[in-house]
Image (cartoon, rainbow, N blue to C red):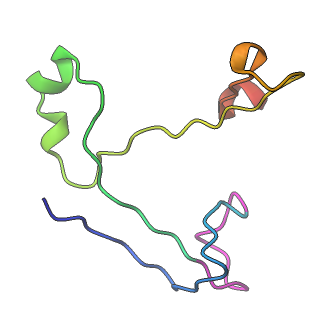
Amino acid sequence: MKKYKIHINVLWVNKAIGAIAYDQLRRIDILLCHMVYLQQLMVKIKTIELVEYDKSPGIRQNAMVAVMRYLSYDIEDALVLNKTSVK
């Protein structure tokens, strides 16, 4: 399977990837590296198969979750935050 990449003003700075601002695609004062790879869906439900959502180009993105420890070094007291709960 081929992997497709979208490059917008590619600039490699220590191979760092991240979001710098909410309006990062509209800013003109920076050079930005934003890469998107099409992925296979990890979870499929019957609705996705019925409407053939997984066959649409450019839509297949899996959620990336960062787990942050709170008090100790094990995962028992980790926090998982999403964007809507923080706002």
Q: Residue at x 74, y 23 (%)?
A: 79
Specify the quadrant that holds the N terminus: bottom left
Residue 30 colored in magenta in the image = yes
Query: In this view, which residue lies farthest toward the right?
Result: 71
In this rendering, position of residue 55 left or right of residue 22? left
Residue 82: image location, x then y, percent: 65, 30
Residue 52: image location, x then y, percent: 11, 33
Residue 80 colored in magenta in the image = no
Q: Main secondary structure of the magenta part?
A: loop
- Residue 32 against residue 74 in the figure, above or below: below
Residue 63: image location, x then y, percent: 47, 37
In this rendering, position of residue 47 left or right of residue 35? left
In this rendering, position of residue 81 left or right of residue 42? right
The answer to which image quadrant residue 7 occupies is bottom left
The residues colored magenta run 21-32
The answer to which image quadrant residue 54 occupies is top left
Q: Residue at x 67, y 34 (%)?
A: 83
Residue in front for this viewpoint, 43 or 24: 43
Residue 77: image location, x then y, percent: 78, 15
Residue in front for this viewpoint, 70 or 36: 70
In this rendering, position of residue 7 left or right of residue 24? left
- Residue 55 against residue 68 in the figure, above or below: below
